[in-house]
Amino acid sequence: MAVSVPSLHRQKHELSNPDYQLTVLQQGTAFPAFADQLKQHNLFPLKPTGATILQVNVGKMCNQSCRHCHVDAGPDRREIMTRETMQLCLDVLGQNPELTTVDLTGGAPEMNPDFRWFVEELSKLGKQTIVRCNLTIILANKKYNDLPDFFKAHKVQVVSSLPYFAASRTDAQRGDGVFEKSIKALQMLNAVGYGMEDSGLILDLVYNPSGAFLPAAQQTLEAEFKRRLKTGFGIDFNNLFCITNLPISRYLEYLLQSGNYESYMEKLVDAFNPAAAANVMCRNTVSVSWDGTLYDCDFNQMLELHVAPTAPQHIRDFDLAALDERNIILNQHCYGCTAGAGSSCGGQTVA
């Protein structure tokens, strides 16, 4: 299959357009439709197993512009969830005890001006709250330096991106100096008890490959990360989540510019695992965008693939029973979540 790559200027403009990204994903006939793969294994239509997680993107503003960011987040983004929309999320969570976990993401979620208020209100509801922290935000400005204490006070589970246990690979993916700042932030989290045995304060790390390849075995990488970070920097953490890069946004741009798009898609398709497909995160998660629109997952959100029209489209109209009956919207990028041991916001999905 040949994928035409437009000029760099035109490509950068078009890759910000979800319709263009979907066109690239759909080109050619070499790769079978993802839906057809599911049909072969009696998994189509893909249905929810019952939502227990509300994943909320509180905005695309970020202090970093990481090379593989599927959100295309950065300092220049102005999409920010309002307190009004946050209140709608709180109302939904209060009315639906089945939703036991709230997963806050961004951008850097901490940059939303109402972030701390939102976490405080979630704490009052007794929900398990996850914050996806890029670590460097803790050191970005004095007003963020107390985040470890704030997280501890509200028993937030911190999930932090650390592409590698060495500076060269981390900085190549996330920017110069990011590794050093990330190590300092992890030490600050450790200092208040995060990642320490019996503290009850969970600190998880996220690894995603720096190139056009799939992640190695999660268990093996976790052991290596723990050994290297402990011996090199005195850092402890709980779990390592291995996440496959999905071919959307900046990572799709990288694949096209480097000439790796076709070979990477072949890797994903060849590694399709029906057991992973049965355990994809969209089956127990509802994703809320910064403006309150509902999606099956964070990746569909970036491609503007809304939930099925039979389901509520906005958090103001939330109906869990109707959402649990919907057909999940699929496209070729879904191969990324079903390759090998599977991939989700919580790492691999099968042993």
Image (cartoon, grey):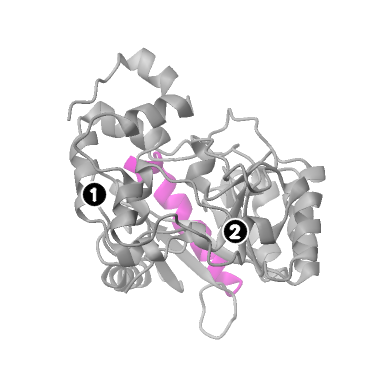
For the residue marked with disc 2, what is the amino acid?
A: Glu
Residue 188 within the segment the image draws in magenta: yes
Toward the bottom, the furthest residue is 198
Measured along the vertical axis of the image, is residue 141 above or below residue 236?
above
Dividing the picture into quarters, in which one does residue 67 lie? Answer: top left
Please provide the residue range marked out in magenta: 171-193
Quadrant in which the N terminus appears: top left
Task: Residue at 29% x, 46% y: name it.
Answer: 210
Which element carries disc 2, helix, strand or loop? Answer: loop
Residue 329 visible in the snapshot: yes
Q: What is the quadrant of residue 241 in the picture? A: bottom left
* Left or right relative to 278: residue 48: right
Q: Does the magenta run of residues contain 318?
A: no
Which residue carries the number 2 mark? 325
Closer to the N terminus: mark 1 or mark 2? 1
Circle 1 packing at 10 Å, graded few (<14), some (14-19), many (20+), is many
Q: Is residue 171 above or below residue 327?
A: above
Q: Nearer the viewer, residue 274 or 293?
A: 274
The disc placed on residue 57 is none
Q: Residue at 26% across / 26% down in the picture?
A: 257
How far apart in space, not on screen, are marks 1 and 2 (Cα)? Answer: 28 Å
Residue on which the image places disc 1: 269
Q: Residues within 10 Å of mark 2 (few under 14, many from 20)?
A: some
Residue at horizontal 75%, vertical 62%? 93
**Relative to residue 95, is residue 348 drawn left or right?**
left
Kind of residue indicated by mark 1: Val
| Residue 249, horizontal then vertical, whole percent | 42, 34
Picture coordinates of residue 64, whole percent (x, y): 50, 38
Mark 1 vs mark 2, foreground winner is 2
